[in-house]
Amino acid sequence: MAFNVHRPLLRPIFQPTTALLMLAVALPAAAASVDTQARQPQIEQIVANISPQRIAAYVDKLVSFETRHTASETVSDTRGIGAARRWIQSELVRCGAAAGGRLQVTMDAFIQPAGPRLVAPTEIVNVVATLPGTQPAERARVYVVSGHYDSINGDQLNVNAAAPGANDDASGTAAVIEMACVMAHYQFDATLVFMAVAGEEQGLFGSSHWAESARQKKMNIAGMFTNDIIGSSRADDGRVDGTQVRLFAEGIPAVSEMPDAIRGLIATGGENDSVSRQLARHVKEVGERYVNNFKVTVIQRRDRYLRGGDHIPFLERGYAALRFTEPNEDFRHQHQFVRVEEATQFGDLTEFVDPLYVARVASVNAAALASLAMAPAAPQQVLMRTAKLENDSTLSWQANPEPDLLGYRIVWRETTAAQWQDGLDVGNVTQYTVKGRSKDNFFFGVQAVNREGNASVASYPIPAR
Ligand SMILES: [Zn+2]
């Protein structure tokens, strides 16, 4: 067939519904198509190369510094946060060189003033590894993945007692180092930033500093993931569930002044179509495509009660940002002094981290990052045309700049559905009318698709006459 008019997302391909077969006759023949559901060999290789053994070794090494408290000592080469960050830097430099020298490792250092959780002004250092995009038209589009390498024990101000932080958050830091080392061997159209941040436990200082400087530089951060407490599949009641990870995705951001884009969402019932929710849909679809027997459970809120993470400074600056966290946390092994009480071991120790589980979460991250950085940008200026009352749905958008662009796909779902349910390849056009499918009854999105079959995150249309 010359074009595949209907590509169901949840059913096998090439089984168009009768109604859409009839519709196919009326469509222009320009809608070239490519299979966006197929696994890309490069992403399969990346996922296959994520190593639980290396992740275990990274966690062990981070725990060996005894404490990585943000205000702990920095002179020793074996103890404290200074030794920890120099080791992370050397590890990223070493594997960047082994991968051909394209990974750029920098130390993003600044002085954080004293405050309620920091007794003196303290130097905070983010270790940042950047893999520049290879497509000049897409290099400025950036995806960030982070873990925090600082740790605490049962007293936020105690810089000397052991704070192993194996799960919180050597697990996320190890995942980020492993992703950087594996992915540095490959080329991506857009830019990837792998970041180990500090000052998280004292108030998200490292991530706030980096996100603020990104905002001031007007960086195009198209997506950010933080990995925080991804180390264990065991709940406090002993249940083990290694088959899923929680992905926290904020809807309408809690901002004091409402931008027009948010007003457009609310006015059309689009509170489940924020940029972070669109990103989460994409991560769930791609993560589950590449990591077998593993579920990405989207939680439609910013974070857990009483807790926060390094995605929040990005959300607060208008970027799409998500948090990965294990399914059932065991609070005996977070923010605790290492001790035994009534035969119960407390403390964030290595023995409670499962490297196989961390590797699965790292694989979901890596597959999603690779897919995003190989795909075009989400279409801009996407509008739902509302000039007259009708049951067809006309969408328009700005043309994408990527040289390898194939065309666009319009996706939709019922208003109560969480994930996209259906889609239509519409060719390389910037306006299209979906006949007989009312914008009143479905949520629509527009994706850009390139010749290799990589589909962008969907963009939600705001209404316009
Ligand atoms: Zn944490």
Image: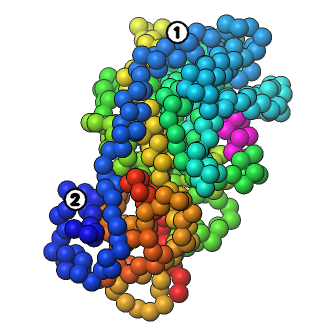
Q: Is residue 209 magenta?
A: yes
Q: Secondary structure at mark 2?
A: loop
> Which scheme is used to colour this image of the protein?
rainbow
Residue 272 in picture, x, y percent from top left: 45, 62
Which residue type carries mark 2? Ile
Give the vertical position of 148 relative to 342 (above or below): below
Left or right, residue 1 beside residue 318? left
Q: Residue at x 61, y 19 (%)?
A: 94
Residue 370 in picture, x, y percent from top left: 47, 42
First in residue order: circle 2 vs circle 1: 2
Q: In which quadrant will I find the N terminus?
A: bottom left
Is residue 132 visible in the rendered structure shown here?
yes
Residues 449 and 283: in front is 449
Residue 148 in picture, x, y percent from top left: 60, 29
Mark 2–mark 1 distance (CA, rounded to whole Å)? 56 Å
Asked if ligand 1 lies within 8 A of label 2, the reply is no
| Residue denoted by label 1 | 339
Q: Residue at x 39, y 71 (%)?
A: 427
Image quadrant assignment for residue 289: top left
Q: Secondary structure at mark 1?
A: strand
Residues 301 and 140: in front is 140
**In the rendered picture of this protein, how many numbered marks are placed on residues?**
2
Residues 87 and 170: in front is 87
| Residue denoted by label 2 | 13
Image quadrant assignment for residue 458: bottom left
Give the vertical position of 62 relative to 255 (above or below): above
Q: Residue at x 54, y 48 (%)?
A: 189
Q: Which residues are magenta?
A: 204-212
Q: Is residue 24 magenta?
A: no
